[in-house]
Amino acid sequence: MDIVINFSRPGKGITRYVERLVDSDPVRMKTLNHVPIEFRQKWCEEIWWQNGCLPHGILIGSVMKYLYYKEWLSVMQLLAIDGDHLGYYVDIDTPMLKIDREYYLTDLFLDLWIPPDGKFTELDRDEFEQGVRMGLLAPYQIKKASQVFENLKLSVTNGEFFRMIY
């Protein structure tokens, strides 16, 4: 079954994703999408290789998403063409909200890249600070995003993050 996820990026609009539902419970929803062959190279070049998240030449075959109803984050697990785990990209965002038959999240800019070795990299701190300066986030969102981000880094270090995924 396919579902629609509306991902709002303050100052940049809303992107609608159609995702294949894999699993859903009261805590989270899990989706899986295969990256179209014609899109793989460009997506990896422009995002994943350029940002240093993946080594040049490694292509993403599919993306498993973990979207939470009460957590202030969502997780993309990147998988290689052969299904090998490439890493987790964690977005700090609002908890997922269901309205009618669609789902809604708002990006709070801060992101974390967690490769297989678990040595994470902070991403988009500059975007977060710019969003704060521009007034794109409410004070409670700024505070919550900062708290969740610090807790996330701690949970990766102590292994709790990985238990949350599975």
Image (cartoon, grey):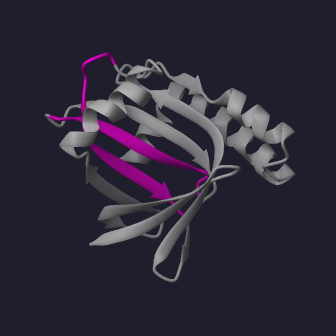
> Vertical placement of 85 versus 73: above or below?
above
Look at the image and say whether residue 75 sits in the magenta stretch.
Answer: yes
Dominant SS of magenta comes to strand
Does residue 50 show up?
yes
Does residue 96 show up?
no
Span colored in magenta: 55-81
| x 22%, y 46%: residue | 36
Judged left or right of residue 108, residue 73 is: left
> Vertical placement of 122 versus 63: above or below?
above
> Vertical placement of 7 versus 36: above or below?
below
Residue 93 position in % (x across, y down) = 61, 50
Q: Where is the N terminus found, in terms of image quarters?
A: bottom left
Residue 41 position in % (x across, y down) = 27, 31
Judged left or right of residue 26, residue 41 is: left
Look at the image and say whether residue 68 sits in the magenta stretch.
Answer: yes
| x 86%, y 50%: residue | 139
Judged left or right of residue 148, residue 43 is: left
Residue 91 position in % (x across, y down) = 55, 42
